[in-house]
Image (cartoon, grey):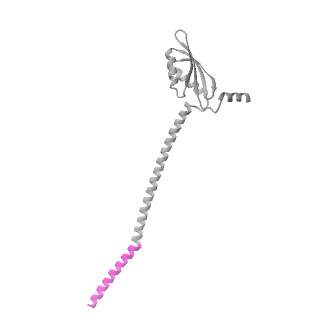
């Protein structure tokens, strides 16, 4: 019986040692791996959050870039509509284009004067009454605001000779004709 007891005690001792070895293995190897996995899971969540924030920033930057591009386009249009200087050449080109679209035969386009942010152009030409009316209509729809200040018509048989004075604004830093006169006297 004692032998049986000893055998049972040996089996019990072996079982306890195996259990103890299992607990040591679990504590030594598996528990640290579990915490490592938990830390990695937290790191993944943190990195996913950073990725989402980065995507939101990129989206915001793309949106801002689109807004800046649209604003730049509007600014260019505004620069044509109300230029910073008299820009006589572009004004004359716009008037000539409006006359061409109306079928008005242009004799001349001259810059008459520049005063306090207003450029005055005088256009002479000929065509039918309809051509002249179309020209005035085109000028009214011009990107750069244009005011017809004077219109003189004279019939020459089949056509009408027209002299049209136009006023076109621009952003002025002061009295431009005075500045031009000062530049001429300084030279």
The overriding secondary structure of the stretch rendered in magenta is helix
Relative to 12, is 171 on the left or the right? right
Numbered range of the magenta stretch: 1-28
Compared to 42, does 13 lie above or below? below
The residue shown at (63%, 26%) is 114
Q: Is 119 contained in the magenta span?
A: no
Quarter placement of the N terminus: bottom left
109 above or below 40? above
What percent of the width, then of the height, locates residue 142? 52, 26
Q: Position of residue 3 (x, y in %)?
A: 28, 89
Is 21 magenta? The answer is yes
Q: Is residue 141 left or right of residue 107?
A: left
Asked if 95 appears above or below 155 in the picture, the reply is: below
Residue at the location (29% across, 86% down)? Answer: 7
Q: Residue at x 41, y 65 (%)?
A: 38
Residue 9 x, y percent position in the rendering: 31, 86
């Amino acid at each position: 019986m004692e032998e049986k007891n000893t055998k049972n005690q040996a089996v019990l001792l072996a079982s306890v040692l195996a259990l103890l070895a299992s607990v040591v293995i679990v504590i030594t190897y598996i528990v640290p791996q579990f915490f490592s996995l938990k830390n990695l899971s937290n790191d993944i969540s943190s990195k996913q959050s950073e990725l989402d924030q980065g995507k939101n920033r990129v989206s915001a930057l793309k949106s801002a870039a689109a807004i800046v591009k649209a604003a730049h386009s509007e600014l260019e249009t505004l620069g044509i509509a109300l230029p910073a200087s008299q820009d006589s050449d572009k004004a004359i080109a716009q008037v000539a284009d409006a006359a061409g679209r109306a079928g008005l035969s242009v004799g001349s386009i001259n810059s008459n004067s520049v005063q306090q942010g207003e450029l005055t152009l005088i256009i002479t030409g000929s065509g039918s009454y309809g051509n002249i009316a179309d020209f005035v209509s085109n000028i009214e729809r011009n990107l750069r605001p244009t005011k017809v200040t004077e219109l003189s018509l004279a019939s020459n048989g089949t056509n009408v000779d027209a002299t049209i004075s136009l006023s076109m604004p621009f952003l002025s830093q002061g009295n431009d004709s005075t500045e031009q006169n000062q530049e001429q006297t300084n030279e």
